[in-house]
Image (tube, rainbow, N blue to C red):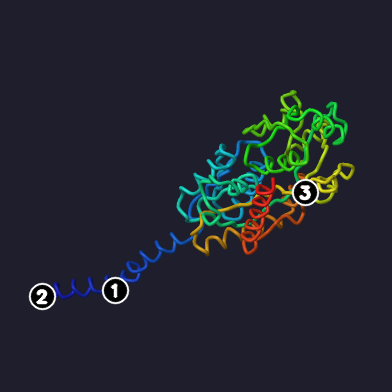
Amino acid sequence: MLGSAISLLRRSILIGIVLAPAIVATPWSGARSQDRYPSRPIEFIVPWGPGGGADQLGRMVGKQLETIFGQGVPVVNVPGGTGATGMAKLLAAPADGHSMAVYIADTHALLAGSDARWKLEDITPAAVMLQAPSFLFVAENSRFKSWADFEKEARASPGKLKVATLGFGSVDDFSLKVLESKGVKVVQVPFSRPSERYVSILGGHADALYEQAGDVAQFLSGKQMRPLLVFGTTRSESFKEIPSSHELGYPVALPQFRAIVVRAGTPPDRLKALADALAKVAASVEYKKFLQDQFADPDSFIGADRADAFLKAQLEEMKRATATH
């Protein structure tokens, strides 16, 4: 009887020794699983409606990130407030790298005002993915055959001509205020939905459209609209016959940019993993073709190491434009 008890005790001790490493490894394995990034789908917030330039960028980048990370990257459209509504959603999420947002120049411009709901310090850019100039477009059959025609009528009848824009407080707004300071006064007609803004000049709801060429590429190739003016220091390589704002004496050249940001406080290793993945996307053949189709700068990409400085410089430029005009 005593021998059986001793034998059973020895067996229990042996089993404990064998199982001990496995028991110890269990919490370590769980911690390792939690540290893996991304450990679940990354919510990709697009603070604009479907079909616009920000949405196109989000879906292109999201698709490639899914391949790189092996996780879903669902795009969530959250329009409103010139991007402020989408930014509020991002800032309400945990700073764990599982939520990110497309951040564009027009949303950035809100920080140049006095009532922005967040600060630049609240976000961290993982990359700037696209930079492109903006234009004033008219319908192909518009009575304005050139910028000179548009400028002449705007000066003769201040406040008569209507320009479709993204909204007040945006880069669109800043640029048009510079024109107004030089005697070219127009009326802004804001459209929150990209599709409505694009077709506004085709349906006669506006006389001109402030937009990037890539966003209306289908209308340009379909000969439904054409540019009158490019906002920049030089002419566009794609539309060399169109004058630039600077050459005509309008000192404004705020480019449209589209960045990808996360909440400030995101762990550095996760930010680096995301930034490295975005660099891979930007180097891909598919993305370079995307930039070409968007009439964007082929050297648009700015990595995380320089993106913060870029956003700060852009904000200072916007503040100067606001203060001056």
Q: Position of residue 209 (x, y in %)?
A: 74, 34
Compare residues 261 and 38 and report the one nearer the observer: 261
Which residue bears the numbered disc 3?
251
Which residue bears the numbered disc 2?
2
Q: Which amino acid does label 1 sit on?
A: Ile
Q: Can residue 156 be seen in this view?
A: yes
Q: Which amino acid does label 2 sit on?
A: Leu
Secondary structure at numbered mark 2? helix
Q: In which quarter of the image is the C terminus?
A: top right
Q: In which quarter of the image is the N terminus?
A: bottom left
Q: Position of residue 175 (x, y in %)?
A: 72, 43
Residue 80, quarter of picture: top right
Residue at the image position 69 percent from the left and 55 percent from the top: 282
Secondary structure at numbered mark 3? loop
Residue at the image position 65 percent from the left and 63 percent from the top: 306
Residue at the image position 85 percent from the left and 36 percent from the top: 147
Q: What residue type is labelled 3?
A: Pro
- CB contact under 8 Å: marks 1 and 3: no
Q: Is residue 133 toward the left or the right of residue 67 in the image?
A: right
Label of residue 17 in the image: 1
Q: Earlier in the sequence, mark 1 or mark 3?
A: 1
Q: Is residue 214 visible?
A: no
Q: Where is residue 35 in the image (x, y as percent from the top left)?
A: 46, 62
- Give the farthest residue toward the left: 1
The label nearer to you, 2 versus 1, is 1
